[in-house]
Image (tube, rainbow, N blue to C red):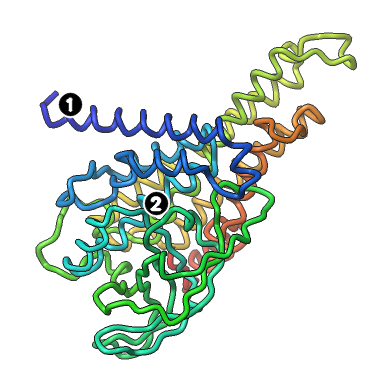
Amino acid sequence: MTTKELTQETVVEQLLEEAREIGELAEKEAREAEVNGTISPNVAQLMRKSSISKMMLPKEYGGPQVDLRTFGEIVRTVAYYNVSASWLTFLYPLHNTLPSYLEKEARDEIVHQGGLISDIFAAIGTYEEDGDGYRISGKWNFASGVNYSDWIGVGVNMQLPGMDEPEVCLPILKTSDLTIVENWDTFGLRGTGSNQIIAENVYVPKERIVPVSRLVSGLPPEEDYDRDYPFYNIPYFPAFYMGFPYMALGGTKRIIDEFKSATEKRRRLMDNGLLESESPRSQRVMAEITTDFLAAEALMDQYITKLEDSRNNPNSTPNAEFFAMRTKITKTCTEIAVRVLLTLGGAGLYKGGPIELFFRDILSVATHKTSLYEDSVQAFGQELFGFDSGVRG
């Protein structure tokens, strides 16, 4: 093994260790996050200080640039301990891909400031020209992690110089220029702090605006760019969304382990005190949820393989197929979580217990717009019969 390979191996081990530290701290402070509707400042600070927050920056900024599989494993590792923290461990470094598509001056401004980044793609904002920049206004919900972010990209339908018609763009604003409305009071994923934001005539220079078409093209604006950057030259949105099934897998593995632990210790009166682990009923459940989980893992592996293969063949996998694969993984995970809860019965219902918390969070991952199973199979079915589904990822 070469020195370079050893170094990369060490970097990955360090990142996974940081992921475990974030996850363990978030699990320890999960009750506080449930009450407050956001991760604690302690968890946010650990994320900010870790190498993980910088791992999707181009190499020129000195971060531990990682491949897509490593990124996914880091997200999954945190999710084993706390899914809300995993959501943000995914999104904060993921959003570092946005300035990677800006001109260097604007990219340097954001990266060297060192803060965390949030975003909202929904193009519901408005804009007015103001000199060499624009004034942005709007109200957006679901701004995950905005309480601790320094920057946020917001969706606005804009016509910038050189465009033939308006298109969706992401002006990257300073969070300090916005009003945060803490309205995140939900069934699950409470620690994500996905609050509402309001912008009122917030100025943004034109250099700090990312057209979504540039993301879709897979290339930054300059010709001399980092050829090894994992998000260049691949379908951007299928890569951008890949963390959600990884979260579901991490949380579901924890549910399976909790089920096994509870079942090994459990005696049910209806079985005359027989250990539940000796019951063919629970043995069958354990076998089936485990094989279902292995199938979901295999589909996740195939998903990443297809992303990797797309570097050489950009049109090898339709976006709708990526969509259907992601949602099938998440659907399988939710079905495992439901089966575990219904097999354990009332023992799994106690508030704050691991089964109850992970059950709520995994089902909540499945409600994200990129995880909606019925939408995905409809789109994929259209593509299979030769129709354009219009799915972007």
User: Would residue 85 be found to the left or right of residue 289 on screen?
Assistant: left
Instruction: Judge left or right: residue 107 versus residue 391.
Output: left
Q: Position of residue 385 (x, y in %)?
A: 51, 68
Q: Residues within 10 Å of mark 2 (few under 14, many from 20)?
A: many
Q: Quadrant of residue 131?
A: bottom left
Residue 297 rendering spot, x and y as whole percentages: 48, 37
Q: Which mark is residue 229?
A: none
Residue 335 placement: quadrant: top right
Q: Quadrant of residue 20?
A: top left
**Can see residue 234?**
yes
Look at the picture and state if 184 lies above or below 356.
below
Question: To which residue does mark 2 refer?
Answer: 92
Q: CA distance from mark 2 to mark 1?
A: 27 Å
The residue drawn where x is 44% and y is 35% is 22
Please report the residue visible at 14 percent of the width from the left and 23 percent of the height from the top: 1
Q: Is residue 300 above or below residue 8?
A: below
Quick check: 308 left or right of 267?
Answer: left
**Nearer-the-camera pick, 217 or 308:** 217
| Label of residue 6 in the image | 1
Q: Position of residue 181 (x, y in %)?
A: 57, 65
Look at the image and tell me whether residue 387 can be seen. Answer: no
Could you say where residue 228 lies in the image, as x and y percent from the top left?
18, 50
What amino acid type should be assigned to the residue bearing mark 1? Answer: Leu
- Residue count near mark 1 (Cα–Cα under 10 Å), binned few <14, some 14–19, many ≥20: few
**SS for callout 2:** helix
* Above or below, 322 relative to 21: below
